[in-house]
Image (tube, grey):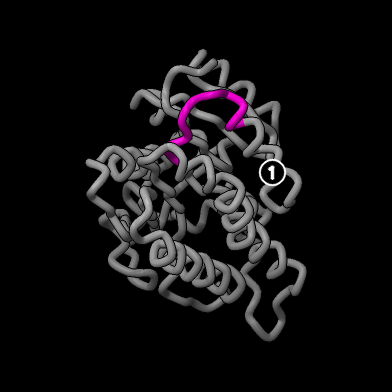
Amino acid sequence: MVQKNIAVVTGASSGIGAATARRLSAEGFHVVAAARRLDRLEKLVAEIGPDATAVACDVTSDASAAALAAAVTGLGAPVTLLVNNAGGARGMDPVAGGSVADWQWMYDVNVLGTLRVTQALLPALEASGAATVVTVGSTAAFTVYEGGGGYTAAKHAQTALVGTLRLELAGRPVRVVEIDPGMVRTEEFSLNRLGDPEKADAIYAGVREPLVADDIADCVAWVATRPQHVNIDRLVVRPIAQAAQHKVVREPR
């Protein structure tokens, strides 16, 4: 039986999710690391040690989200934190030529994935008596840009979900937090989106110190460890070189 309070982190096989799992373990949680790639999760859990559990989960599957909830509650400890981190982007097509399949995938992962996992774990979170749901969104949740129609639409929908959830849970012992990062350099996000290492690297060209996964993990840990009566509704975090979506300082190479 697990003795510590449980934190569930989706999308934990790499990037922000993996960094968050490490950080929350250091903060005293037993971390359930969830993602599709079990081999990566097992390596992460081996690194963290006994205060972590790997659970394979595909957030695009109702059955998989339900199985995650069953595995988490089976650990026998209070579930006090959910970090909805699973998400992603595909393509930079204009709206006029955008791939419907890419848009569907982005909506399913970012929006419906958040919905599935939150619904599945909410009974356990509320039963703990003092819980927090943190959703990692994006500055794309409130700013659109050319070539980002599908991703910004999904992230706008995700932020609408989070805001609605906060209203609906008012008076119940569950805080609802949204963290919206700007430019974060991770090993996979831009590569998965663009499918080309050179194009992915060009996103960060000349940008001094873009955010990294540990920066966002630090934000997750901070909001999750505030006194329970303190709710950080929305935390927007960018590197100092990015004043806005369209305003990025790039140094000459």
Please state the horizontal and vertical placement of residue 66, each as a whole percent of the image: 69, 44
- Which of the pair 209/124 is nearer the observer? 124
Asked which quadrant contains residue 226, the reply is top left
Q: Is residue 188 shown to the viewer in this render?
A: yes
- Which of the pair 188/105 is nearer the observer? 105
Q: Residue at x 71, y 81 (%)?
A: 97
Asked which quadrant contains residue 238, the reply is bottom left
In this view, the residue farthest toward the bottom is 96
Residue bounds of the magenta highlight: 72-81
Please state the horizontal and vertical placement of residue 17, each as a whole percent of the image: 51, 39
Q: Residues within 10 Å of mark 1 (few under 14, many from 20)?
A: some
Q: Is residue 251 shown to the viewer in this render?
A: no
Three-letter code for the amino acid on which mark 1 is drawn: Ala
Q: Which residue is mark 1?
A: 66
Please state the horizontal and vertical placement of residue 206, each as a whole percent of the image: 38, 55
Q: Secondary structure at mark 1?
A: helix
Rendered position, 141 above or below 57: below
- 102 sits to left or right of 132: right
Q: How many marks?
A: 1
- Which of the pair 150/111 is nearer the observer? 111
Q: Residue at x 67, y 61 (%)?
A: 108
- Which of the pair 156/207 is nearer the observer? 156
Rendered position, 53 above or below 125: above
Asked whether 204 falls inside the magenta stretch, the response is no
Rendered position, 75 above or below 143: above
Instruction: Please identify the quadrant where the N terminus is shown.
Output: top right
Asked whether 80 falls inside the magenta stretch, the response is yes
Q: Residue at x 74, y 73 (%)?
A: 99
Q: Residue at x 56, y 37 (%)?
A: 12
